[in-house]
Amino acid sequence: MKKLQVVLAAVLVTLLLSTNNFAQNQEMKTDVAANSLNTGIKAESSEIRKEALFNLAKEENKETIPVFIDRLKTETDEELRLLIARILYNFNDLEAIEALEDMAWNDENLKLRIVCAGLCQDYASKNPNEFRFNAEALNKKLKYAKSN
């Protein structure tokens, strides 16, 4: 009986150690992938940046929202900024929508402002208790910006 207990304890210790090593290995793979995507997002080539953004978006991890918000603010390629806005919208998350609202009101790119306003208006219509969007006031501001 004592030998059986010792054997079972040894098996449990072995399982725990191998599970811990597996988890550490998976964590290292995740870190390597994150660093690779981070490098890709900041690449000089817009095609590489686009591919990295798509790959990061596939993860559907809400922890990446700040990365997308930062890229939305710093990206220079208009097409990629519009893509990032749509990615943020697809998270269906208030933090992402608030970043889009900020872009709708304040960004210099009129096309991006219009797209962000539309995304915010759509989100507000689907989530009226969570998010209010003053589309009328923004539309007046956008019409004024278009006329100048």
Image (cartoon, rainbow, N blue to C red):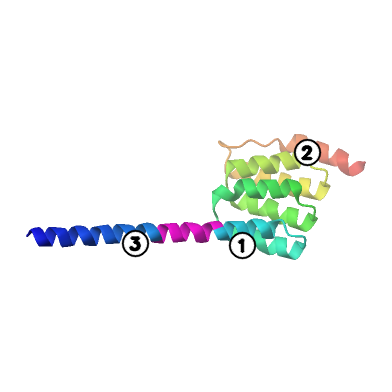
Q: Is residue 138 left or right of residue 63?
A: right
Report whether 75 appears left or right of 20.
right
- The reply to whether residue 83 is in sight is yes
- Residue 55 is labelled as 1
Asked if the stretch drawn in magenta spans residue 120, the answer is no
User: Magenta stretch mostly in which secondary structure?
Assistant: helix
What is the magenta range?
22-31
The disc at residue 18 is 3
**Which mark is nearer the camera, 2 or 1?**
1
- Observer-side mark, 2 or 3, equals 3
Mark 2 touches mark 1? (CB < 8 Å):
no
Q: Amino acid at mark 3?
A: Ser
Q: Residue 83 at x, y = what percent?
A: 71, 56
Residue 67 tag number: none
Residue 94, image x, y percentages: 59, 41
At x 23% / y 62%, what residue is drawn? Answer: 11
Q: Quadrant of the N terminus?
A: bottom left
| Mark 2: secondary structure | helix
- Disc 3 is placed on an element classified as helix
The location of residue 34, given as percent across then percent down, is: 58, 57
Q: Position of residue 84 (x, y in %)?
A: 69, 53
Front position in the image: 51 or 116: 51
Q: Nearer the viewer, residue 34 or 14?
A: 14
Relative to 128, 5 lies left or right: left
The three-letter code of the residue at mark 2 reads Asn
Q: Residue at x 69, y 46 (%)?
A: 70
Q: Earlier in the sequence, mark 2 or mark 1?
A: 1
Read off the residue under disc 2.
106
